[in-house]
Amino acid sequence: MEEIESHDSGLDSSMVFTDPDVGDYHRMIEAGTYNVIFSAYGYFADTVEGVTVNYDESVRINASLKQLPPTLNFSPDTLEIFMDVSSKQTETLELENSGSGIVDYMLSVDNADSYPWIDIPAPSGTVRSMQTKNVDVEFSVTDKDSLYTCNILLSHNGVKDYKEEDYRENYDTVDTIPVILHAGKNTPVADKVIENQFQVNCYPNPFHNKLNVVLNLAATNRELNISVTNSNGEMVYSRPIKGLNSAKHEFYLDFKAENISGTGLFYLKIENETGIIVKKLLRLK
């Protein structure tokens, strides 16, 4: 794509695209001096500055873009699943290599022996340049209504540019993909019901020790339970609250005062008899 800096916009689609076969491009523009940006998916963008175009003349600009290094992206960034007890379900992670070369990857469940409800049947493979690959993640819940959490670790290596000497055997990059599984009554329908009853806001988020939790209740709730779970699925805080009327309520949660250790991802869970709302929290050092 060829774009004029501070001139083209996505609203009028005035940028132009090169011919896919021979790579040339043409565009009409008023006389003046411009910065020309060349870009393409999977390549570093390049800007040619100070290009002067005179009236009734043409200017030729050639650009050669460098490929991006192998870059493995994944989506979604969090796997959130709703399912019934005594059922099985398969979700998909999409891996995309948006650079050049080849990326080898390996997926694993952190501390897998503690989480028998999740399995990745084909945990390793290769993603070629500019390609995507879907990886199945299987879930099976048999015992009880609950909130299950764990982390998937995505390990991947560097360049494998069709040359054996460029191949790095060790997986040197690790990304973390949080998993949140709502089992039993915590279906999307139940969540919709509870979201109609109240809304939850948490700030600041990310935070260090002190977190403000704001509840906007549409009706009186006989009892709510507020709990915090760490990324290993361990409940580190629990507090029942009774008799809240339909109004805005705010309380403060001090992780340090409550002796809640650790940093990284936590999950705030607020539930009543109709369902559960879960908010992701990020605690900084």
Image (tube, grey):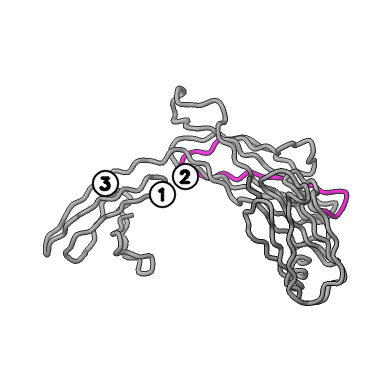
Q: Quadrant of residue 253?
A: bottom right
Q: Mark 2 points at which residue?
A: 98
Q: Name the residue under label 3.
A: 63
Asked if the residue under mark 3 is in contact with the one under mark 1, i.e. CB atoms within 8 Å, the reply is no
Q: In the picture provided, is 135 more to the left or to the right than 161?
A: right
Give the residues in magenta: 126-146
Q: In which quarter of the image is the C terminus?
A: top right
Residue 190: give x, y in percent of width and height. 78, 66
Q: Which of 88 and 165 is in front in this view?
A: 165
The answer to whether residue 3 is magenta is no
Tag 1, which secondary structure?
loop
The amino acid pointed to by label 2 is: Ser
Identify the residue shown where x is 78% and y is 35%.
113
Q: Name the residue under label 1.
A: 41
The residue furthest front is 257
- Dot 3, how many residues are within 10 Å of its Cα: few (below 14), some (14-19), or many (20+)? few
- Say above or below: 1 vs 170: below
Asked if the residue under mark 2 is in contact with the one under mark 3, i.e. CB atoms within 8 Å, the reply is no
Identify the residue shown where x is 21% and y is 64%.
29
Q: Nearer the viewer, residue 170 or 265?
A: 265
Q: In the picture provided, is 25 more to the left or to the right than 236?
A: left
Instruction: Considering the whole magenta stretch, tell me its main secondary structure.
Output: strand
Residue 86: give x, y in percent of width and height. 85, 51
Asked if the residue under mark 1 is in contact with the one under mark 2, i.e. CB atoms within 8 Å, the reply is yes
